[in-house]
Image (cartoon, rainbow, N blue to C red):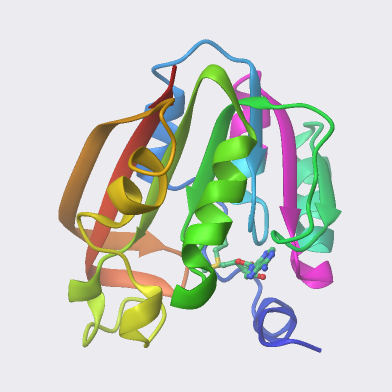
């Protein structure tokens, strides 16, 4: 059992059942369409998007997370397509209006590759919505990787996506000091990066 399966098995909920606030607020600005949620954990964001009328494709490498997502969707009476998949193998049949990366942190040597793959899943005219921990999160106890190389900084998405692809424009890029309240594992003062990248 991997670390995520153990964590999801040992806790009723890890990041809660409410959606990430930044992701939900960005989604609310857009007409409902198709959304892809890589690394979606226990499904809080997938289930929220489906309840707002979006057609949801989600995946996670953790089978326990995926089972919990399916159960949450059933309990809320919404349909989501969720599967066990590795972000470095996942190959959707079609692109999406929105790709949401919520606390999807990869080791530095694979980070740009992951972001480039996820960018390919966005339709022309669509966008990528991201929230992840900033490097200034190191030393705080409200969640996130304990490795500097897995954390983001202000230029992460400019470097990985905007400068790498000529169809990408970073339209929102904020370092956000906030108090997180997302289940038992994301509680308290935190520093995140919130990013929106628009595809031409
Ligand atoms: C911090 S959790 C975030 C979960 C969810 N996005 C949320 O905010 O509630 C990170 C998730 O990434 C998943 N993950 C890590 N590496 C992955 C990979 N290569 N492919 C798919 N999922 C992965 C883990 O299983 C875990 O569920």
Q: Is residue 22 left or right of residue 17?
A: left
Q: Is residue 54 visible?
A: yes
Q: Position of residue 40 (x, y in %)?
A: 64, 55
Q: Is residue 145 above or below residue 31?
A: below
Q: Is residue 52 left or right of residue 82?
A: left
Instruction: State the image quarter where residue 143 is shown.
Output: bottom left
Q: Position of residue 20 (x, y in %)?
A: 44, 48
Q: What residue lies at 49% left-to-right and 76% top-to-bottom?
A: 109
Q: What residue lies at 55% left-to-right and 17% top-to-bottom?
A: 124
As for residue 191 lying within the magenta part, the answer is no
User: In terms of depth relative to the viewer, which is nearer, 45 or 112?
Assistant: 112
Q: Is residue 160 left or right of residue 154?
A: right
User: In terms of depth relative to the viewer, which is nearer, 100 or 78?
Assistant: 100
Q: Position of residue 141 (x, y in %)?
A: 29, 84
Q: What residue lies at 69% left-to-right and 59% top-to-bottom?
A: 87
For the N terminus, the quadrant is: bottom right
Quarter of the render that holds ligand 1: bottom right
Q: Is residue 144 left or right of residue 4?
A: left
Which region of the structure is painted magenta? 47-65
């Amino acid at each position: 059992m991997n670390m995520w399966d153990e964590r999801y098995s040992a806790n009723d909920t890890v990041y809660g059942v409410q959606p990430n606030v930044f992701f939900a607020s960005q989604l609310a600005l857009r007409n409902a369409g198709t959304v892809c949620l890589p690394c979606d954990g226990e499904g809080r964001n997938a289930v929220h998007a489906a309840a707002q009328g979006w057609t949801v494709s989600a995946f996670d490498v953790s089978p326990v997370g995926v089972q919990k997502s399916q159960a949450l969707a059933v309990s809320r009476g919404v349909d989501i397509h969720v599967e066990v998949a590795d972000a470095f193998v996942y190959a959707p049949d079609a692109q999406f209006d929105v790709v949401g990366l919520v606390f999807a942190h990869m080791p530095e040597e694979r980070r740009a590759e992951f972001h480039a793959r996820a960018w390919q899943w966005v339709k022309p005219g669509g966008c990528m919505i991201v929230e992840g921990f900033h490097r200034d999160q190191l030393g705080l106890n409200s969640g996130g990787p304990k490795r500097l190389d897995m954390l983001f900084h202000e230029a992460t998405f400019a470097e990985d996506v905007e400068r790498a692809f000529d169809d990408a424009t970073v339209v929102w890029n904020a370092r956000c000091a906030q108090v997180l309240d997302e289940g038992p594992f994301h509680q308290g003062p935190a520093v995140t990066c919130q990013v929106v990248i628009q595809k031409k």
